[in-house]
Image: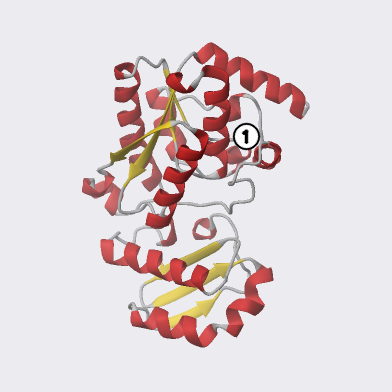
Amino acid sequence: MSLKEKWARLIKILKEMQGVVVAFSGGVDSTLLLKVASDVLGKNKVLAITAVSETYPKEELKSARKIAKLLGVRLRLVKTKEWQNKKFRSNPPNRCYYCKKELFTILKKIAPEENLNWSADGTTKSDEADFRPGSLAAKELGVRKPLLEAGLTKEEVRNLSRKFRLPTADKPAAACLASRIPYYTPLTEEKVRMVEKGEAFLRKQGITGNIRLRHHGALARIEVDAEAFPKLLAKREEISRYLKRIGFTFITLDLEGYRTGSLNEP
């Protein structure tokens, strides 16, 4: 199916939905979905919901608010409570299921209150190849995936985002802060804050692209794109000093560079 055909299918899907509550993270996928839904259905038939939690970076929240304002779409912030769930905090491989179930349950409650027919998220066709336990929560609660239903891949979403000049077109992939901590290592606010502070510091040092600070107890494992290695190594003293100050003892650079789901590797 061509991109033109997929685009036409997406428009048809959204028109049939008539109204939608969108799980909005401010990332490339949910931003495109929000943009297209508001164009097709009208802004009064679309509501963006952004979850505020311990695992959602503050900078991402600022970005989501800015993008929603740019698009002229209503945005509601909701405080999610997955942190109160012991199963979530125990950090099993299906951790994302508990987080998404919490968020999607809220979406399903808000949708009828706003006289909107559906809830949806920004899952794409490319996401099917990744390990995504949250998809089960979406299936259980009837949350739609218009981009996936239309057959759009991540790269096609980026291409369409460039066409519409969306600020997220080339934004690196993001994931919740809990994804930086190995499975079965209990989640704590201290660990999550260390990760958030560390990644923010790396960006302030001019490191761009994909950045992950993996928390292995006393050891910090930095994943960045291979192209960023020279800049990171040039700043190694400042980076090491800062990361030790916030609680790490050993600072390492992963020579394989950034890759999706490295904590899923054997």
Q: Residues within 10 Å of mark 1 (few under 14, many from 20)?
A: some
Residue 215: x and y in percent read: 41, 68
Q: Looking at this view, is 55 or 167 the one in front?
A: 167
Q: Looking at this view, is 37 or 4 the one in front?
A: 37
Tag 1: amino acid: Lys
Q: Is residue 194 left or right of residue 81?
A: right
Residue 244: x and y in percent read: 38, 82
Above or below, comparing residue 172 to residue 159 in the picture: below
Q: Looking at this view, is 142 or 29 the one in front?
A: 29
Instruction: Kindly give the residue lying farthest to the right in the view shown.
Output: 2
Residue 196: x and y in percent read: 39, 64
Residue 182: image quadrant is bottom left
At horizontal 43% and vertical 30% (from top left) the residue drawn is: 138
Q: Is residue 51 left or right of residue 153?
A: left
**What residue is pinned by disc 1?**
125
Above or below, comparing residue 102 to residue 255 in the picture: above
At horizontal 29% and vertical 18% (from top left) the residue drawn is: 113
Instruction: Kindly give the residue lying farthest to the bottom in the view shown.
Output: 237
Mark count: 1
Circle 1 sits in a helix, a strand or a loop, which is it? helix
Above or below, comparing residue 260 to residue 201 in the picture: above
Residue 155: x and y in percent read: 69, 42
**The N terminus lies in which quarter of the figure?**
top right
Q: Is residue 100 left or right of residue 206?
A: left
Q: Looking at this view, is 92 or 243 the one in front?
A: 243
At horizontal 69% and vertical 69% (from top left) the residue drawn is: 227
